[in-house]
Amino acid sequence: MRLLVLGGTVFLSHAVAAEAITRGHQVTCAARGTSGAVPDGATLVRVDRDAPDGLAALAGGVFDAVVDVASISYPWVADALALLGGKAGHWTFVSTCNVYADHATPGLRPGAQLLPPLAEGGRGDDTDPDRYGSIKVASENAVRDELGDRAFVVRPGLITGPGDGSDRFGYWPARFARGGRVVVPDAPDVLTQHIDVRDLAAWIVDAGETGLSGTYDGIGPAGPLPELLRDIADAVGADVELVPMTPDALIAAGVDYWAGPKSLPLWLPPTHAGMSSHDATPSLAAGLHVRPLSETVAGALETERRLGLDRERKAGMSAAEEAEVLATIKQQANAASTSGGRLDSGSGRD
Ligand SMILES: NC(=O)c1ccc[n+]([C@@H]2O[C@H](COP(=O)([O-])OP(=O)(O)OC[C@H]3O[C@@H](n4cnc5c(N)ncnc54)[C@H](OP(=O)(O)O)[C@@H]3O)[C@@H](O)[C@H]2O)c1
């Protein structure tokens, strides 16, 4: 198969190109080449999707399958479709679970209500996260309109494993690898789910090979967050004590949800109970395979070690921040014992 990957220099698109090469396909990657190198065996065609006529170098190309990972640009998607859509045998568009209007209800499937489409903007530094879901909706629509039953639209949730630069899932293996007392959310009702980048890439290459079409979530089965964290700790195998803290105690200590500074990645508020608990059944039935968690943890940890376990992170807590949070538990325990009271089991353990 002649495969064009619009991207190919980083994370998911790199994994797609690498998987396709392993299977013996002829892979062209189109990117600026500034985010990294394409996998060995792939050809890089330099394009700049922000420049006028930026895809010109691909004009003569004919491809059996195209994979586009355009994240927040409708014009990127429209330009690629105009140039190549009519000639491509199959087209994968990587969208996102952020297209859904409802983030509160668990168990959603691809037929659920979407945000209104936004078919404008999105070049250069237009990276407003509030527009992300709507731009993806418009992009999905354009792909379906152009390709019809040759279009495979996949909506990933949290993508994990080797090469993840978002610092979210990787926080946990990295933190457990450092050992000691680890603050975790005491949130048995919070569900979480993810997909290893290699599994998603394999499914995307499968789709190009078999002509799979339709719209699917690109995500593995959901499960309780505390269980996942325990399993990650077991997979890492370091000497750790998990210190569960209730959501109220975490918020009082200034800890944020999901991502960003001083956060606990993957932890979500009740308003977002549906964001990481989609129903994976249709995707699994359509051929998505999910590898054992231990492999995802190993891949993520390898990336974390390469980046540096003690680096400044985009998501998670620094060692100093975590020590401060742990100290608040100790203070509460001391206050409770001197007042003759008993430590509220919801405030964490010391
Ligand atoms: N990470 C997650 O958990 C998550 C969750 C849901 C959905 N998604 C979706 O998954 C996809 C992730 O894609 P990805 O992992 O491959 O990473 P990405 O960071 O979106 O990069 C994609 C590619 O775009 C290329 N690129 C950037 N600017 C360009 C330009 N001006 N002209 C041409 N190419 C350009 C980059 O190469 P160069 O910089 O070398 O040009 C890179 O190869 C996105 O569609 C995202 O919305 C991700």
Image: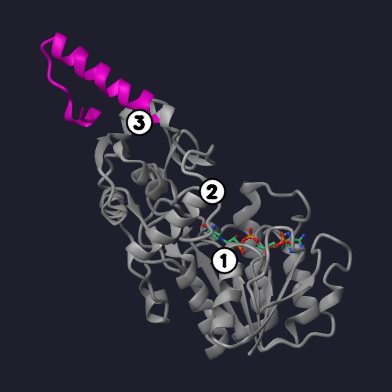
Q: Is mark 1 within 8 Å of ligand 1?
A: yes
To which residue does mark 3 refer? 250
Callout 2: 10 Å neighbours few (<14), some, many (20+)? some
Q: Residue at x 33, y 61 (%)?
A: 222
Q: Residue at x 65, y 69 (%)?
A: 8
Q: Is residue 147 above or below residue 191?
A: below
> How far, Cα to Cα, is label 2 from label 1?
18 Å
**Residue 317 placement: quadrant:** top left
Q: Residue at x 73, y 81 (%)?
A: 85
| Element assignment for label 2 | helix
- Give the magenta range: 322-350
On the picture, is 17 further left or further right than 160? right
Callout 1: 10 Å neighbours few (<14), some, many (20+)? many
| Nearest to the observer: residue 155 or residue 160 | 160
Q: Residue at x 15, y 9 (%)?
A: 338
Q: Which of disc 1 and disc 2 is earlier in sequence?
A: 1
